[in-house]
Amino acid sequence: MASITLENSFQSTTKDMGSNHIKAHAKQHKYLQENEPLIETLTDNKQEDNSVELALKYAQEKEGLRTPEKWFKYNQTLRKSRRKNSYLEYVLGVSGTFRTAKQRRLANPKTNKKTREKISREMNALIDNNGIPLDGSLYYISNTEIYDSMTIEQLKKYRQFEAETFRKFFNSKTFKELNPQNIRSEIHFDENGALHLQTQDVWFHKDKRGRLSYAKRAIIKDVLTKKYGSAEALQDRLDVLCGYHRYVEKKGKQIGANRADTMFYDFMEKHPKGHMGNSSKTNKDGTKRRFAYSKAERTTRLVELWRIEQMHELGQIAEATAKEMGINYTVNRTYTTDGVHLDGAAYIEHKRVHKKLNQQVQQVQQVTNIAKNMMSDLKKSYKELSGEETEAKSPLEVAQKIKKATKTTKNEVIANQSTIKTQQATIAQQNQQIQAQQQQLQTIQHQRKNEQDEIKQLKKQKRDLQTEIKQLQQQVKSAGLIVSRWIRRNWQRLESHFRDYARDMSSAQNERLYGGANGTGDPYNAQLYEQKAKKGLLASFAHIENEEVEKSGLGNVIKKSIEKQNNNDLER
């Protein structure tokens, strides 16, 4: 929920708009988002333009205010007693009625302090503006308290919605009708407050005789009469508005109660003609009158009705735009404050107090939630201790029951602790035994693993030996076959050498047994015969082998191989 706000006064100067505004708020970019402009100008003017010059130009071109040249010529045609001493005096004369009314209220002792302070600021602004009253309006559809509750992405999208709402409102038929002499309108992004639309208007009115004066209420009366279709329709609405104001003043602007403007619009939707009930139009003598409230009271509500019409239009545009952009936004129909206007310093203090109160409310809520959680936890603890539910209504009562149950549980725990200690000691001894057994088992497993590794190695050696034996057996077998075949083939040549070998070996045996001078054996001669037998046999083998090599044609190759082998043997 958000409130539509329209603040309006004649305190506005050229310092409030354009480049002057940017300079004044250069260090107030608290809520300014990325890629947002500092200000957005909606009217056809530049940021550097002077508002007073824009107002004079508008009044001179559109409303009949004389330019300095035309005024000088016109002034010369007047009697000396009626002549003005300067162009400024002429401009001040146009707004004379306006200034007189302000000064009269300022001098009235019944005017309250805040109103006098406001009028004083308006008179100072009039001086700064060279006698041109600039009517400044600020339109808000939210406040910074809403901003503070949002994330960065939410706030960025929300401010886009606000800006789009103000653009549509500025271009709406209602705004154009009710602000016919708007000279400057801007959307201000660059303040510590909420994003808002700020405008400056003038109210130059020409009467039936062509005389120009500054009369806001007269122009508002004309534009509302045109809007409603007749002066009588306007007076009917003012009459209704007076009635609701009387109702609110009687009950007071209570926070949360329906506002006078919302009740007024609800009534107008049900009764478009806006007639008050006849009971409120009865005089003391029983006669009937046209309106329930006096002309003077109705006239005081003119500016307010002008404000209400704009706020209503702005609220409708805001809700429609929010729906289009997917924003959760609803206009608040009730009073959210006591209706007392706050100046800048007072508003900042109000916001600080409001923030502090919100923090206190949050703290109270947190304490309440903690208490509820504590109560739930205490009841749960009691049930776990005693196995029963408790009907206690306060944390203290539950705590007392828990204390009692805890004592009982404590005694049981103490009794069980002794048993537990004994069991723990037994378990510790068993653990030591288990650890010793585990160490023995690990040692045995390690030994077994080593034995298995040795067995694997022995098996491998056995397999290798078996393989070698088979190879050797095969080689021996092959060698025996080769030798046997060689002997059979060369037996005729070997036979005589074997006989010689046998004869010499027999002689060696005789010499060993019976030789010598005494016939008891001669070992020396025996050894000579044995050597002769062996050398003769080997020489015969070598002779036959050489013949075989020569026949094969490989004699030179074998010789070279033998020489190379002998050389290698010498090198080693």
Image (cartoon, rainbow, N blue to C red):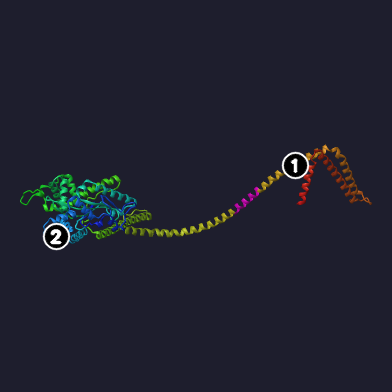
Q: Residue furthest right?
A: 517
Question: In the image, which disc is placed on residue 104?
Answer: 2
**437 or 351, which is in the foreground?**
351
> Which amino acid, mark 2?
Arg
Can residue 157 be seen here? The reply is yes
Give 120 or 455, whichever is nearer the viewer. Answer: 120
Magenta highlight: main SS: helix
Determine whether the residue tagged by mark 1 lies in a helix, strand or loop.
helix
The CA span between labels 2 and 1 is 146 Å
Q: Quadrant of residue 191?
A: bottom left
Q: Name the amino acid, label 1.
A: Gln
- Dots 2, 1 in contact, CB < 8 A: no
Residue 314 pos. (x, y %): 23, 48
Residue drawn at x 67%, y 48% is: 458
Viewer-nearest residue: 300 or 372: 300
Task: Out of 2 and 454, give the one closest to the viewer.
Answer: 2
> From what the image shows, is residue 173 above or below residue 403?
above
Residue wearing tag 1:
475
Secondary structure of the residue carrying numbered label 2: helix
The residues colored magenta run 443-456
Which x, y percent locates residue 274? 14, 46
